[in-house]
Image (tube, helix red, strand yellow):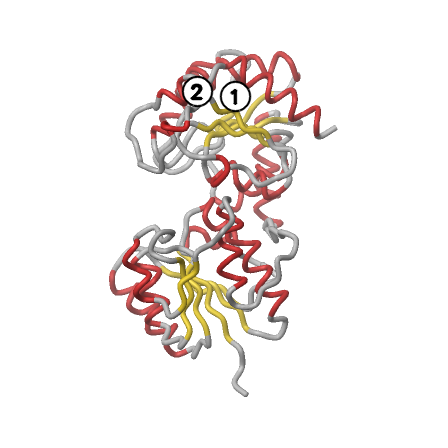
């Protein structure tokens, strides 16, 4: 009988990968002797490094069509028995198809991010769960995975943790909280002036200083938060993904919108307060027990449509609401 060899396709981004980890852990529980390999964009490799549920991580470089075709050719040579596309995009579905796997599992047209990609699959699954973690689990269940407890097997590189520790020491940060003002769309963001006011109030109430988490292209936003905060200033840390993992694992608290850092912190078990406007926390909210969401949006304001301006739903969230949520969340963690 040929070796069972499963291909997981989830190329990015940070939060999407975090939401997929429990499904892959469930696949490992169902197939303890199989090779399970995950293809991912190079930038996100630290999230999967030393994952005990994976036999190998296959890197996709994003810089050229040639690298995409080379990755597809490599997958073809590995003779997978099944490919599971958790991404639902043309790019991911093509890689699953290029793999040559006779069984290809993905979402139905309604649930795929690009609906027509369902044509590339041999099995199309309509999930019943509300949250993306539960929906991803439905794809794993189609390959025999049990509905087991949700595991997020994240491993921080020791050298990244050491470098991060040096930066925290140089900045004079002992106990600290993290504010993450960025998000994939402006309509999911809370204004930097309010993050600044939140920092002042949390620093006064807790005696801790904050660190500002920011991604590529978000330095100006982080600087705006620091200017708005005044004294004591939050610390801006120029860190990579591996050090971000170390930062969020060490933090006493994380406050963020619907973004990758929020979901990564929640997966580590760090106390989280999520600020939500247009996106539905039932689908995209923090998955950790006890985490709190602040949201004022009306049902008709709920959407996955990307917006380039602050949404009324996010602007309706007050600093006072967030401070109260932080106090409840920290109280729950004691």
Return the residue found at the far left: 65
* Residue 288, numbered circle: none
Who is closer to the viewer here, 292 or 269? 292
- The Cα–Cα distance between marks 1 and 2, rounded to whole angstroms, is 8 Å
**The one of 215 and 259 positioned closer to us in this rendering:** 259
Tell me the quarter of the image containing the N terminus: bottom right
Count the labels in the image.
Answer: 2
Residue for point 59% across, 51% down: 154
Q: Position of residue 288 (x, y in %)?
A: 61, 39
- Rendering coords of residue 151 (x, y %): 63, 52
The residue positioned 63% from the left and 65% from the top of the image is: 29
**Residue 276 percent coordinates (x, y):** 46, 28
Residue 27 at x, y percent in the picture: 57, 64
Q: Are marks 1 and 2 in contact (CB under 8 Å)?
A: yes
The residue tagged with tag 2: helix, strand or loop? helix
State whether residue 120 is above or below residue 23: below
Decide: is 44 above or below 234.
Answer: below
Residue that numbered label 2 is attached to: 225
- Would you identify the image quadrant in which residue 10 lies? bottom left
* Residue matched to label 1: 234
Q: Is residue 243 above or below residue 139?
A: above
Among the two numbered marks 1 and 2 on one chain, the one whose residue lies closer to the N terminus: 2
Residue furthest to the bottom: 1
């Amino acid at each position: 009988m040929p070796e069972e060899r499963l291909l997981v396709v989830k190329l990015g981004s940070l939060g999407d990968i975090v939401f997929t980890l429990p499904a892959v852990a469930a696949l490992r529980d169902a197939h303890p002797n199989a090779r399970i390999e995950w293809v991912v964009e190079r930038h996100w490799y630290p999230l999967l490094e030393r994952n005990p549920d994976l036999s190998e991580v296959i890197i996709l470089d994003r810089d050229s069509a040639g690298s995409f075709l080379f990755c597809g050719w490599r997958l073809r040579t590995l003779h997978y028995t099944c490919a599971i596309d958790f991404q639902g995009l043309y790019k991911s579905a093509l890689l699953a198809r290029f793999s040559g796997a006779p069984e290809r599992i993905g979402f139905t047209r309604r649930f795929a991010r690009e609906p027509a990609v369902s044509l590339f699959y041999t099995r199309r699954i309509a999930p019943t769960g509300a949250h993306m973690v539960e929906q991803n689990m439905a794809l794993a269940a189609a390959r025999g995975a049990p509905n087991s407890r949700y595991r997020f097997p994240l491993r921080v590189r020791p050298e990244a943790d050491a470098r991060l520790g040096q930066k925290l020491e140089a900045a004079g940060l002992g106990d600290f909280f993290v504010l993450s003002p960025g998000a994939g769309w402006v309509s999911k963001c809370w204004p930097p002036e309010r993050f600044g006011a939140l920092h002042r109030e949390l620093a006064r109430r807790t005696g801790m200083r904050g660190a500002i988490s920011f991604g590529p292209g978000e330095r100006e936003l982080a600087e705006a938060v620091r200017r708005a905060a005044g004294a004591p200033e939050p610390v801006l840390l120029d860190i990579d993904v591996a050090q971000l993992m170390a930062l969020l694992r060490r933090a006493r608290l994380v406050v963020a919108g619907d973004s990758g850092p929020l979901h990564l912190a929640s997966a580590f078990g760090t106390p989280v307060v999520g600020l939500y406007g247009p996106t539905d926390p039932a689908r995209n909210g923090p998955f950790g027990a006890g985490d709190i969401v602040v949201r004022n949006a009306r049902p008709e304001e709920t959407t996955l449509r990307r917006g380039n301006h602050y949404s009324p739903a996010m602007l309706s969230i007050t600093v006072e609401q967030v401070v109260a949520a932080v106090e409840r969340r920290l109280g729950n963690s004691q």
